[in-house]
Amino acid sequence: MDFDLIVIGGGIVGAAAAYRAGQLGARTLLCDRRDTGRATDAGAGILAPESGTRYGRLWYDFALDAVDYYSVLIEDLTADGVPAAELSQAYSRCSMLTVALDESEAADLAEMEQEIYARQEERRPPPAERIQRISSAEARDAYYPLLADVSAVLLQPVTRRVDGRLMNAALEHGLRSRGVHTLEADVAALLLEDGQLIGVRTVSGDEFTAGAVLIAGGAWSEAFGSQLDVQIPVAPQRGQIIHLRLPEQDSGAWSIVRGFSGHYQVPWPGGRVAVGATRETGSGFAPHATVAGIQEVLHEALRLAPGLHNAAIHEIRVGLRPYTTDHLPLLGSIPGAKGVYLATGHGPTGLTLGPYSAKLVVEQALDQPVAWDLAPFSTTRSFS
């Protein structure tokens, strides 16, 4: 069967891409080999770009649009028959605390605060959503009862969280509604004639023709670079996350907590709290937990929230984030390979940026209007 678009990779980026293609009426095939350690299945799912200052202005502006797109995506999936109960478990609104544990971190928080407030003035959010200082006692009493006695706290009253596994399941439901073909297969090669894509070949020898291919293979995407004679500058960065259980706790209304060490705590209903995460650049394709990683995550978790000391360890998740050195994704067409497109490199913010990135690249591949200029995300950009 001939396809308009073949998507390689079935994480949240690939699934969202195939779903958008289906919405546009394109004959679409999603090929996924279900790699152990894909980032979607492990990510914590914090959608809070309004208080993000780490990755620069381009990332910030893009992330704001990306998070806004979630509300559109949820409406579309609902219209396509995905049960509301399923979606409410996958995506929900909450609040977030950014905390400084000591005076040194408090000074860093004060510096970050000024940038957040300046950007907030540009966006002019409703008063009820404005980021603001609160006391340590208020943070503990009203937002996160397990919190340490901290030096300073910023409250973001409205943010969002997404469960990557459940959102992927919702997207897969949407794919069926849109008539998208799916195949559990390992794509071994792209089929090219004079620099023009004509299809793909799987490891089992099956060939499928297509007008375009979108590579959304996460950290594994770079494998296609040698065939295309281009560098796809993405590498695996291991992240270890531990899910804890607190029986009989009404944790669903608690705030996300983010510390200055890069660690966080994401509460979910039913007494579940995800704590993490390591950022192990240079880990290679090794999606297993380590003694050092578990020690780091638990040590930082108890520094932020001593009230977790009696929590049960429910599950350890390990994901290989597709990491780029400038912390920006790789999006759009690949020079010299007509019909080949890329959507990867989201690093630790794949759940934030992924669905919107996928939407934009699919629209580019199918010659639709694209809301963003994707040139700054090209593989040919200068990397720092």
Image: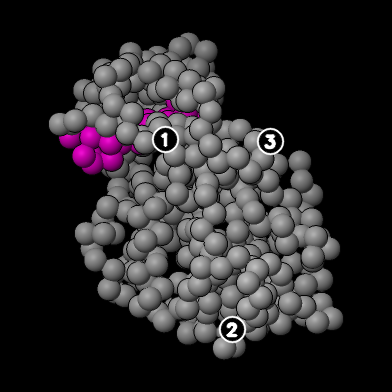
In the displayed structure image, the side of residue 213 where residue 305 appears, left or right: left
Q: Tell me the residue that label 3 is attached to.
A: 282
Residue located 37% across and 36% down the image = 315
Label 3 neighbour load within 10 Å: few <14, some 14-19, many 20+? few
Element on which disc 3 rests: loop
Q: Amino acid at mark 2?
A: Asp
Residue 291 placement, left or right of 193: left
Q: Residue at x 48, y 58 (%)?
A: 12
Q: Are marks 2 and 3 in contact (CB under 8 Å)?
A: no
Camera sees residue 58: no
The answer, for residue 83, to whether it is visible in the render is yes
Q: Earlier in the sequence, mark 2 or mark 3?
A: 2
- Which region of the structure is painted magenta? 250-272
Q: Secondary structure at mark 1?
A: strand
Query: Does residue 352 lie above or below 73 as drawn?
Result: above
Look at label 1 and name its amino acid. Answer: Ile
Q: Nearer the viewer, mark 1 or mark 3?
A: 1
The residue carrying mark 2 is 4
Pointer 1 residue: 316
Q: Earlier in the sequence, mark 1 or mark 3?
A: 3
Which one is nearer the viewer's eye here, 297 or 182? Answer: 182
